[in-house]
Image (cartoon, rainbow, N blue to C red):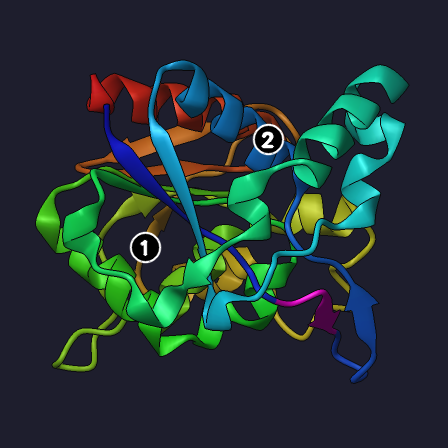
Amino acid sequence: MAKVLFVMTGVDYWTLADGSRHPTGFWAEEFVVPFEKLKAAGHEIVVATPGGVVPTVDKTSLDPGFNDGQDTADYRAQVIATNTELSKPIRLEEVELADYAAVFYPGGHGPMEDLAVNDDSGQLLTTSLESGKPLAVVCHAPAAMLAATKDDGTNSFTGYTLTGFTNIEEAQAGFADKAAWLLQDRLVEIGTDFRESDPWAPNVVVDRNLITGQNPASSAGVADELLARLT
């Protein structure tokens, strides 16, 4: 079956407008749900992070309120704690796109901190778009698109229709007035056609080989769309 690259944040904090650091990392549902769907279909997963750092899960994302109850929260925590792919990531700097059939970026606030300014990630995103291979990005992970710059200085995602975590959702999460910048604003600024749906409702947008999801609830739909392109 296919080999799929999961590109994940390598930080455990997000710097807010006042300079303070909010503890974060990757969002549990956005990793576990696509991971399990792809593995169940027989695909191989390889995790890559900047510097090969073991990814940190955002502890808030394991709260029962974000997981339809304690049982699901405990299950996802166990999947993460025992996951060999997560515990042995490769270095993002050494990734060769030719080795993979598709690329997936799970979110969490972590990508707002590191992947948004990571040139290796930006180049990988640009190359992925140009390759025609499926590229799936969910929730806050589209922040990584800000680092995807072509040789002429333009952003690789300019003109693409996509979605991501919205300003309304950030406000309802309590961070809109604390963040140094908002993801939706930045994606609009680079010239994307941002498609916003109801807060917290599943919303998957597909444009050519790019698959994007608005929020954690969109993770399953993004994974299903990715799977459909791998069969």
Provide the residue span drawn in magenta: 11-15
Q: Nearer the viewer, residue 38 or 179?
A: 38
Please give the name of the residue rendered at 22% of the width and 23% of the height, measured from the top-left corner.
229
Measured from the top left, where is residue 203 in percent x and y? 49, 27
Picture quadrant where residue 148 is located: bottom left
Relative horizontal placement of residue 183, taking residue 70 as reference (left or right): left
13 drawn magenta? yes
Please give the name of the residue rendered at 71% of the width and 49% of the height, measured from the top-left corner.
57
Magenta stretch prevailing secondary structure = strand
Image mark for residue 192? 1
Q: Amino acid at mark 2?
A: Val
Please give the name of the residue rendered at 20% of the width and 81% of the height, measured from the top-left corner.
153
Q: Nearer the viewer, residue 7 or 184?
A: 7
Instruction: Say whether marks 1 and 2 touch (CB < 8 Å).
Output: no
Measured from the top left, where is residue 211 in percent x and y? 33, 36
95 drawn magenta? no
Image mark for residue 32? 2
Above/below status of 48 relative to 32 = below
Above/below status of 160 relative to 61 = below
**SS at circle 1:** loop
For marks 1 and 2, the one nearer the N-term is 2
Name the image quarter holding the C terminus: top left
Q: Nearer the viewer, residue 219 or 194?
A: 219
Relative horizontal placement of residue 176, taking residue 148 as reference (left or right): right
Above/below status of 190 relative to 55 = below
